Image (cartoon, rainbow, N blue to C red):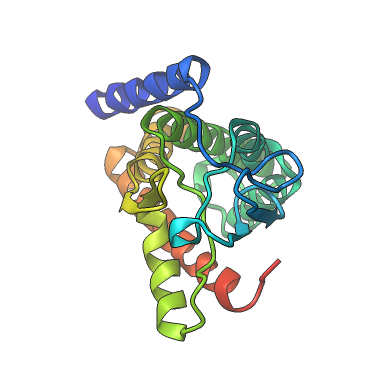
């Protein structure tokens, strides 16, 4: 129960930050994708952006507030997010996990709803803390060509974030959002045999999966 209250507190703070944050002026990309200093930006679902910056330090330009909010919305209900939730629900139904939910359509529906619920908690927490702390938790592919640099970038991105200047720091928003969503789900709507310890395990697995998917983005899927 204490862990549940703790994660609820994180969620409330993050949600408050979403509606109470004030945008910090930066040299961010405009609506056209061109920043004030001439940088260009491209991306697919808002969660993976490739920046081409002629003069910015570290090759990073912080997206503007409109772009950041659009990324948040896409992370909630975008086609890629929805497809992932449905696919994971199908896999879990095939494995019948949790078994209390069954392996038929009703269980599939509960798993889809659960995935959307966990994602809402995660994305809202990450976005709110990003805005309140002026951080950027989105994944950016490495600008370096070396294999080692790409692997390092993929593996550390789930637990790091970028400041306005582009410097990497501990990724408190994503870490908090990942564990808060998993723990809260285990303590509330999951079957009674689940508790916060299962949420911790699930959150750790999720961070590991993010790192693995980042490797795919670095070397295979480069859109």
Q: Nearer the viewer, residue 213 or 22?
A: 22
Q: Answer above or below: position of 197 versus 56.
A: above
Is residue 191 visible in the rendered image? The answer is: no
Image position of 42 with respect to 33: above or below? below
From the viewer's perspective, tell me whether residue 24 is left or right of residue 40. left
The single residue placed furthest to the left in the displayed view is 2
Give whichever of 202, 103 is nearer the camera. 202
Image vertical order of residue 217 relative to residue 181, above or below: below
Dividing the picture into quarters, in which one does residue 113 lie?
top right
Q: Which residue occupies 51% across, 48% down?
A: 99
Q: Position of residue 128 (x, y in %)?
A: 46, 28
| Image quarter (top left, top right, bottom left or bottom right) of the C terminus | bottom right
Task: Identify the image quadrant of the N terminus.
Answer: top left
**Relative horizontal placement of residue 138, taking residue 93 as reference (left or right):** left
What residue sits 49% from the left and 76% below the top? 144
Q: Nearer the viewer, residue 124 or 66?
A: 66
Q: Is residue 121 left or right of residue 9?
A: right
The image shows residue 109 at horizontal and vertical percentages of 68, 38
């Amino acid at each position: 129960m204490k862990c549940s209250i703790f994660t609820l507190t994180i969620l409330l703070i993050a949600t408050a930050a979403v509606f109470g944050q004030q945008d910090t002026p930066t040299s961010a990309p405009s609506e056209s994708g061109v920043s004030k200093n001439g940088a260009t930006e491209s991306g697919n679902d808002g969660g993976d952006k490739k920046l081409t910056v002629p003069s910015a330090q570290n090759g990073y330009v912080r997206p503007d507030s409109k772009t950041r909010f659009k990324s948040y919305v896409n992370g909630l209900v975008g086609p890629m997010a929805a497809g992932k939730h449905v696919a994971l629900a199908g896999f879990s139904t095939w494995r019948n996990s949790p078994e209390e939910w069954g392996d038929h359509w009703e269980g599939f529906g509960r798993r889809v709803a659960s995935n959307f619920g966990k994602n809402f908690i995660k994305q809202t927490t990450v976005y709110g803390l990003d805005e309140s702390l002026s951080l950027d938790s989105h994944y950016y592919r490495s600008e370096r060509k070396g294999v080692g640099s790409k692997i390092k970038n993929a593996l550390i991105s789930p637990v790091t974030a970028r400041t306005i200047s582009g410097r990497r720091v501990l990724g408190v928003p994503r870490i908090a959002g990942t564990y808060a969503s998993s723990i809260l789900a285990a303590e509330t709507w999951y079957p009674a045999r689940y508790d916060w310890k299962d949420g911790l395990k699930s959150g750790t697995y999720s961070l590991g999966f993010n790192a693995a998917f980042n490797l795919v983005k670095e070397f295979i899927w480069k859109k």
